[in-house]
Image (spheres, rainbow, N blue to C red):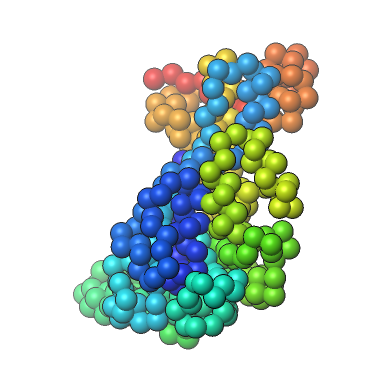
Amino acid sequence: MGFKCGIVGLPNVGKSTLFNALTASAQAEAANYPFCTIEPNSGIVSVPDERLAKLAEIAGSAKIIPTFMEFVDIAGLVAGASKGEGLGNKFLGHIREVDAIIHVLRCFEDTDITHVHGKIDPIYDAEIIETELVLADLESVEKRIQITEKRAKGGDKESKDLIELLRKVYVPLAEGLPARSIIKTKEDEAEIKSLQLITSKPVLYVCNVLESEAAGGNQYSKMVEAMAAKEGASCVIISSKIEAEISLLESLEEKAEFLESVGLAETGLAKIVRAGHDLLDLKSYFTVGPKETHAWTFLNGTLAPAAAGIIHTDFAKGFIRAEVIAYRDYIEYKGEVGAKESGKMRLEGKEYVVQDGDVVHFRFNV
């Protein structure tokens, strides 16, 4: 299981440069004018996880297979997009299809790159995008209320339940707030998610700064961090130019040396992936053997049969039990044999909640 993140932002904030760097491709043209991304570009990237190499070394695995995530580069929105301005509703539709929104904000000054509003103000930029997404959702909810009210008056029970939910979410949208602002519990999240509203999706703010500011940020990124904290959202600082340079390096050693030279401990990709996993409450378990060490992504709280089904539906249908070794135990006792001898392998049944880092072997019968 991977997840799909839509990269949004105003024109000329560095979205396409970031996308190209993250996917190490040139699918999206990074040009100094609005709407250079005419169709959403999609790229699949592997999720960096240092645990994979350690597991593979102990098991003598022939290859490593990481889990993956998908980035979708969505064209720059402008004020009035919800009413069709710029490239309008076409792109609002693309945002509806993603699991989370990566909102890139320009936090750098560069006279060579024009800003669509002629000033650098990431909070103002964020408000413009948020307003357009809220207006799009508000229009959608208003239409659905009209249709659902008619059905409810006709005695349809499902419509009566739905109309209550639609009216509940209408209130914050009418006040200019995103639908996610009223999510307090897992039940709220499930209910509101069923409406497929853009502003119900979790948001990760990405502050795009100059190369010299990538390690510590700047006054603009601090403004965004404060805004994100207030909203309960996530925020990371990256330099799309640094990411572009790293994407051109071939070996891990070269990348590590480059990162050290600019005062960074990890790539922007690693930051975004980690924040994205936290945002969507995703975890990883591993299957390990001589042929391969494989990472599998699952939603936190997933039971063993459903986790097994991520590998193959037959694993879930014929689930018998799971043989589980915690990652730390696998490393400490030098693999499966050592963990077994030390009593660190557990047999778990259908009610077992899979944990992040579990090394698992599923037993099944079809």
- Which residue is at 58% across, 64% downward? 208
Q: Nearer the viewer, residue 104 or 233?
A: 104
- Which residue is at 50% across, 68% downward? 13
Q: Among all residues in the image, which is located at the extreme bottom? A: 175
Describe residue 21's horizontal placement relative to residue 150 as left or right. Answer: right
Image location of residue 131, percent across then percent down: 45, 80
Describe residue 264's horizontal placement relative to residue 162 as left or right. Answer: right
Q: Nearer the viewer, residue 310 or 184?
A: 310
Q: Is residue 363 above or below residue 68?
A: above
Residue 301 position by quadrant: top right
Q: Is residue 353 above or below residue 4?
A: above
Q: Is residue 239 above or below residue 257?
A: below
Q: Nearer the viewer, residue 78 or 287?
A: 78
Residue 171 position by quadrant: bottom left
Q: Is residue 334 above or below residue 307?
A: above
Q: Is residue 361 visible?
A: no
Q: Nearer the viewer, residue 182 or 332?
A: 332
Image location of residue 108, percent across then percent down: 60, 71
Q: Is residue 294 visible?
A: yes
Q: Among all residues in the image, which is located at the extreme front? A: 112
- Which residue is at 74% across, 19% downward? 334
Give the quadrant of the C terminus: top left
